[in-house]
Amino acid sequence: MQVEVGGKTDWDLGVARQSINRKGKIEVTPMNGYWFLSLRDKNKYAFRTEPSTDVHLNLRPHKIGVFVDFEKGQVSFYNVDAKIHIYTFSDTFIECIYPFFSPCTNKSGKNDGPLIITPVNMTE
């Protein structure tokens, strides 16, 4: 999938396994079935591992690509416009995984833009 993240200050984007916990306190780590990248405060990127893995990006992405190779157990993240690989998680998938994304809170209008799912262009 590819998602336009544009002018947002905060978002979460990745995949989650089918059986994730949806009630109570949720710990969003690969061990609990979540593989995703977060943006906070417009410039703080991190992968939700335990502990979190901070990511320093030289170019602010406008569109993020999330690509899964189920057989190899890989979830890869790319800055689509710059054609730059950001990170790849390696794990073993034992059940279905699904897209996971959150636009996060509005922050009094500072984060009111949408996340836009776009088609993957196979020629890029």
Image (spheres, rainbow, N blue to C red):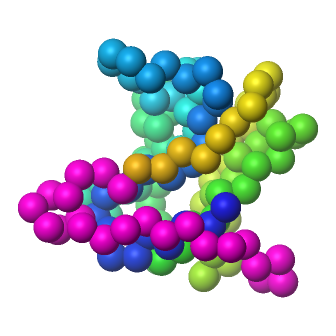
Between 41 and 114, the one lying in front of the other is 114
**Most common secondary structure along the magenta stretch:** loop
Depth check: give the residue in front, 11 or 90: 11
Q: Determine the residue positioned at 47% across, 37% down.
A: 48
Left or right of residue 16: residue 105? left
Look at the picture and state if 91 lies above or below 123: above
Q: In the current view of this chain or complex, which residue is farthest to the right?
A: 71
* Whole-percent x, y for residue 55 in the image: 47, 54
Quarter holding the N terminus is: bottom right
Q: Is residue 108 magenta?
A: yes
Q: Which residues are magenta?
A: 103-124
Q: Is 1 situated above or below 29?
A: below
User: In this orientation, does residue 101 appear?
Assistant: yes
Q: Position of residue 109 (x, y in %)?
A: 14, 67
* Quarter of image, res 83: bottom right
Q: Residue at x 31, y 58 (%)?
A: 10
Look at the image and tell me whether residue 61 can be seen: no
Above or below — where is 58 with respect to 30?
A: below
Q: Check the picture and name the quadrant holding the C terminus.
A: bottom right
Q: Quadrant of residue 52?
A: top left
Left or right, 58 with reference to 113: right
Residue 54: x %, y % from top left: 43, 47
Task: List x then y, in percent, for residue 19.
Answer: 61, 21
Residue lying at 49% horizontally and 70% vertically, measured from the top left: 116
List the single residue furthest toward the left: 108
State left or right for residue 9 relative to residue 3.
Answer: left
